Structures are given as C-alpha cells and as structure tokens.
Amino acid sequence: MVWDDAPSHVCRGGDSRALAFCCPPVKPCPILHALDDVNLSPQEYMDIKEDFAKKTRLGEGAGTCFGSLVWCCKTSKPCPLRDMVLRNIDMSVDEYLTLKKQLSETLVGSSNSNNNDNVNALVDAFSITDEEAVKVLHDCDNDLRTAMKLLRIKALEKSE
C-alpha cells in the first residue's frame, strides 16, 4: 500500500496528515498550528511518534537529523541522510510511505475530514464542482495553497 494522496509537508501548506513527515517541534513553525488543529500538544505529538518508532522500522535511522526515520520528511523532498538510511536498512520507498501513512492515521485518525474541508473550501471560493476540486487538489499533491493559486490563474485566464 503506497500513500498515493500523501499531503505536502505542513510547512508547505499540507494538511495535518503531513504531521507524519514533520520533525520535532523545536522552533516556531507551522507544525504548531497543525498540532492545534488536531488537539495535540507538542509533547503528546512527540510521545506518539516515539512510541510508533519503537514498534516499527521507522525507529531505525541513527544517521538521520533526529536519530530516527519517524522524524524524516516525505521522499519527494531530497534528503541524502534519509535516503542513505533507507538503502542501508533495505527499506523501499513503498514501505517507508506505508509506515508514514500508518503513523499519520495514528496521529490524526484515518478520516478524510481535512481533505473534505479543502474540497469544500475550493468549491465555495471558486464556484467549482466537488469533482473539479478533488482533481485540482490531487494534481497539486494535496497542497491547498498551490491548488488555490492554480484556480486563481485559471479564473484570470477566463476573465480575459
């Protein structure tokens, strides 16, 4: 099972499911807002991720920034440290993303409420159908900001 609709990183406007790709909240950044959205304190977030690391292969990765793959980012973002660990422990990208999806579901649940909220926001803001909103979100890797920019550009082109 690969995570086909994995969201963009939280710091790039991705929804709270992307907390699976975030590092520890050691500085002010968008992760704090995402944690608020899912009613988790920074300590609860760290505890959940550390517990998940103990139970899965995401606990491996002593050579990574924070000492475990559980804190590593999405594979679409280049990272030689993460990639070296994945190679060294013979973990495929598919396995990595499957574990990250499971971690995300542990953190925020398996409901698609965030994606539904994003679809509804696009439908309301741009007067498009649900199907169009789903498609543009998918095309933009579930990055709401990018989807909005794309729809604004299309709206401007239509008005010319």
Image: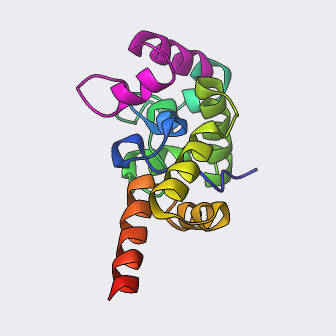
Q: Quadrant of the C terminus?
A: bottom left
Q: Is residue 133 above or below residue 22?
A: below
- Residue lying farthest right? 1
Give the residue at x 59% y 15%.
51
Q: Is residue 98 above or below residue 133?
A: above
In percent of width and height, residue 64 lies at 39, 36
Q: Is residue 144 magenta?
A: no
Task: Say left or right for 138 vs 151.
Answer: right
Give the residue at x 70% y 52%.
2
In percent of width and height, residue 22 lies at 42, 35
Residue 55 or residue 49, whichever sits in front: 49
Give the residue at x 42% y 21%.
36
Which colour style is shown? Answer: rainbow
Q: Is residue 133 visible?
A: yes
Q: Is residue 29 magenta?
A: yes
- Residue lying farthest left? 28
In percent of width and height, residue 91 lies at 63, 46
Q: Main secondary structure of the magenta part?
A: helix
- Residue lying farthest bottom? 160
* Residue range corresponding to the magenta coloring: 24-52
In percent of width and height, residue 1 lies at 76, 50
Q: Which of the 4 image quadrants contains residue 113?
A: top right
Residue 60 or residue 72, whichever sits in front: 72
Give the residue at x 55% y 58%.
123
The number of callouts visible is 0
Task: Say left or right for 140 vs 157.
Answer: right
Q: Is residue 75 visible?
A: no
Q: Is residue 158 above or below residue 81?
A: below
Residue 102 or residue 116, whichever sits in front: 116
Residue 91 or residue 32, whichever sits in front: 32
